Image (cartoon, rainbow, N blue to C red):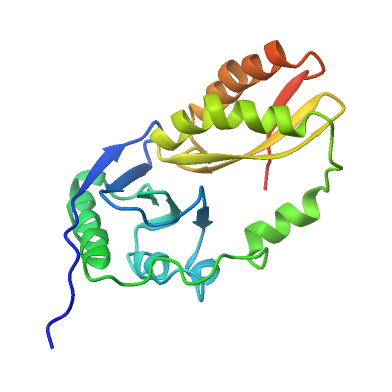
Amino acid sequence: MEEKRVPVTMYAEMTPNPLTMKFVANKHLLMDDASVEFGSMQEAKGYSPLAEALFEFPFVDNVFIAGNFVTVTKTDNVDWDFIVMELREFIKEWIAQGKDILVMMPQGGGSKEEAVAVKKEFAPSEFDEVIIGLLNEYVKPAVENDGGAIDYVGFEDGVVTVEMKGSCSGCPSSTATLKGGIEQLLKSSIQEVKEVVALSV
């Protein structure tokens, strides 16, 4: 019996983070604004067969999947020139064969998520809805364009905490984006906001 193949086009795109490359497909991989990030083979096990397979490559350090793209962070001992074609073809082939991208959403079981849960619990605030609305409208599209994601964590004592994922996590320019862009936007819209910080795990 012939395997069913899906026609897939895919291109690789540089991100502001030099260690991260965004692989964009012409079809959706995850639905409904979902995004998922794995920092190791162990974290990906049982959740994302694609991420597990990508961690088989010795140079893959982090995998982030959202919408219609996969963002791969590499180790710094190898140049993109040598691996970008191989990764692009691998991900494209995986999707074309209709293999599973994500079988289950991680529910705080991974080490990164546990650290986040232990880190801090934020009580709901009256500004949550407004902040989320502003982030969704003005920040999310730009961040996703760069192969990352931003999640609102909480608001307390004038400080907005967000989590940067994908290419934005550990990116040199994400601090500038955070302080120059997001902080200015929220401060100008909500008087009570004094500062925006990234969740450190």
Q: Is residue 196 left or right of residue 86?
A: right
Residue at 79 percent across and 27 percent down: it is 159
Outermost residue, bottom side: 1
Question: Which picture quadrant has residue 92?
Answer: bottom left
Q: In the figure, 134 relative to 110: above or below?
A: above
* Above/below status of 32 relative to 54: above
191 vs 8: above or below:
above
Counting every numbered tag in the picture gives: 0
The vertical placement of 3 against 173, above or below, is: below
Q: Residue furthest left?
A: 2
Give the residue displayed 46% in from the left and 40% down from the top: 148
User: Residue 29 at x, y = what percent?
Assistant: 37, 57
> Which of 153 and 200 lies nearest the eye of the viewer?
153
- Residue 26 is situated, as x and y percent measured from the top left of the image, at 25, 49
Is 169 displayed left or right of 71 in the figure? right
In percent of width and height, residue 116 lies at 72, 52
Quarter holding the N terminus is bottom left
Residue drawn at x 19%, y 58% as measured from the top left: 89
Left-right relation of 125 to 11: right
* Residue 128 position within the rendered picture, expressed as x and y whole percent measured from the top left: 76, 34
Answer left or right for 31 relative to 175: left
Tell me what residue is drawn at x 35 percent, y 53 percent.
Answer: 28
